[in-house]
């Protein structure tokens, strides 16, 4: 049996590594919350796979289903490993589930908040049930390349600027994507007056001097700052080179980030939105808390899969008058209503589970494997 699997592997069979690459393209891990635990959580990357099981919660029942259907990998929306584990034994449920997966050599990948934030991900799917309109993130994601962590600025006499630029570039400054030696040079006039102990290269001690300069600006990684500053000082003709290191903010990304705000093309009543969401989520009922100053119709509506109470303030700032999510704390709901925002709760996994068919199709379009949705994965709640 091992020889057969190895032969298939040599023939180019899909591996766990391929699954990781496909998930990274669908839900880039850099978009996940810094508190989250996403990516490959269990397994070897070089193991061949033929069948993948999808679930929201990786319970013991789902692990057993994966074993019974001969799945080699599970994509679990919620991470099975979140807090650091000091021991993994069969003495508790989580330990038994992990041991089942480990002993059966089943890999586990979790996209969680990276899938929420990505374009075409879970938040976009949830927002599509509200109605047609412009859709944008509640909390836009941002990206900062390591090579552009800071901006180093210096002022150099025009005849020396090229030497300083070359020195800074050689030390690692000026890399933007696939381009190197990137810089900005702006002509300007500089002034300085040397003190009694100074030894000015240009002008005389105690006299105000004016010189034609270039303001030279280059981006730089945190790792290269010291080397770049040293190179600039060494190549600079001034006794005291003016050098500034300016931290740069991350750049917001269009269409990606936590939650969604929908600016409806046509305002809708609370009942109309509720009926639309029930149909979209496949649920019979929703919990609704109406604000003290409930608008007759809603034009701006926000949503977040799972537990979206943490995004309430940002949603209000965006003008939302109705926030849709899975669950929220009781007192947070009361406070939101007092401030004039309506709340609609569908149940935590009800705002997530309906996306699994779309995820199945997206993974299948990238990999030559069978992708199934776990039949044993379901919400723990029932109405009696």
Image (cartoon, grey):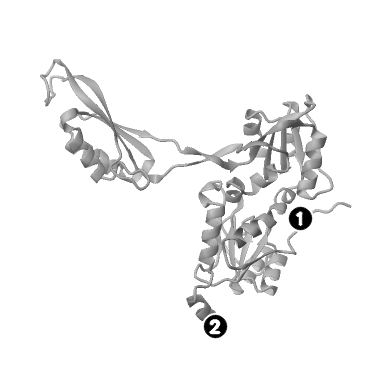
In front: 19, or 348? 19
* Disc 2: which residue: 4
Q: Is residue 281 above or below residue 293?
A: below
Decide if residue 262 is on the left or right side of residue 147: right
Instruction: Using the rendered view, name the quadrant where residue 234 is placed.
Output: top left
x, y (%) of residue 23? 56, 57
Earlier in the chain: of badge 2 and badge 1, it is 2
Residue 370 position within the rendered picture, expressed as x and y whole percent measured from the top left? 64, 68
Up-down relation of residue 199 to residue 369 (above or below): above
**Residue 83 x/y as whole percent:** 59, 55
Asked whether residue 15 appears in the rendered view, the answer is yes
Q: Which mark is residue 379?
A: 1
Q: Residue furthest top?
A: 207
SS type, badge 1:
loop
In this picture, residue 354 sits left or right of residue 112: right
Residue 156's spot in the image, x, y percent?
Answer: 21, 29
């Amino acid at each position: 049996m091992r020889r057969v699997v190895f032969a298939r592997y040599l023939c180019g069979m899909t591996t766990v590594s391929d699954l990781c690459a496909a998930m990274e393209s669908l839900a880039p891990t850099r978009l996940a919350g810094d508190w989250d635990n996403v990516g490959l959580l269990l397994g070897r990357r070089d193991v061949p796979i033929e069948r993948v099981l999808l679930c929201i919660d990786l319970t013991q029942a789902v692990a057993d289903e994966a074993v019974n259907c001969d799945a080699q990998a599970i994509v679990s929306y919620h991470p099975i490993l979140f807090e650091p584990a000091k021991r993994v034994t069969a003495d508790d449920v989580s330990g038994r589930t992990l041991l089942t997966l480990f002993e059966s050599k089943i890999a586990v990948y979790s996209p969680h908040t990276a899938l929420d934030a990505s374009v075409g991900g879970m938040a976009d799917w949830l927002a599509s049930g509200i109605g047609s309109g412009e859709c944008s993130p509640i909390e836009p994601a941002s990206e900062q390349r390591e090579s552009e962590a800071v901006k180093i600025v210096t002022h150099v006499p025009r005849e020396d600027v090229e030497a300083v630029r070359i020195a800074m570039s050689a030390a690692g400054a000026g890399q933007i994507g696939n381009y190197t030696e990137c810089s900005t040079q702006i002509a300007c006039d500089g002034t300085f007056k040397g003190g009694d102990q100074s030894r000015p290269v240009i002008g005389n001690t105690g006299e105000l001097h004016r010189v034609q300069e270039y303001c030279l600006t280059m981006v730089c990684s945190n790792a290269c700052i010291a080397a770049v500053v040293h190179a600039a000082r060494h190549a600079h003709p001034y006794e005291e080179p003016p050098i500034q290191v300016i931290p740069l903010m991350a750049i917001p990304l269009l269409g990606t980030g936590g939650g969604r705000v929908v600016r409806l093309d046509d305002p809708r009543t609370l009942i109309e939105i509720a009926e639309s969401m029930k149909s979209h989520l496949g649920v019979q009922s929703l919990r609704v808390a109406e604000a003290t100053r409930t608008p007759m119709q809603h034009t701006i509506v926000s949503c977040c899969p799972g537990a979206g109470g943490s995004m309430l303030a940002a949603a209000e700032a965006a003008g939302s008058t109705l926030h849709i999510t899975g669950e929220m704390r009781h007192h947070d709901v009361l406070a939101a209503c007092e401030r004039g925002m309506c709340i609609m709760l569908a149940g935590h996994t009800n705002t997530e589970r309906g996306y699994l068919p779309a995820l199945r199709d997206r993974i299948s379009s990238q990999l030559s494997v069978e992708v199934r949705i776990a039949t044993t994965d379901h919400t723990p709640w029932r109405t009696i």
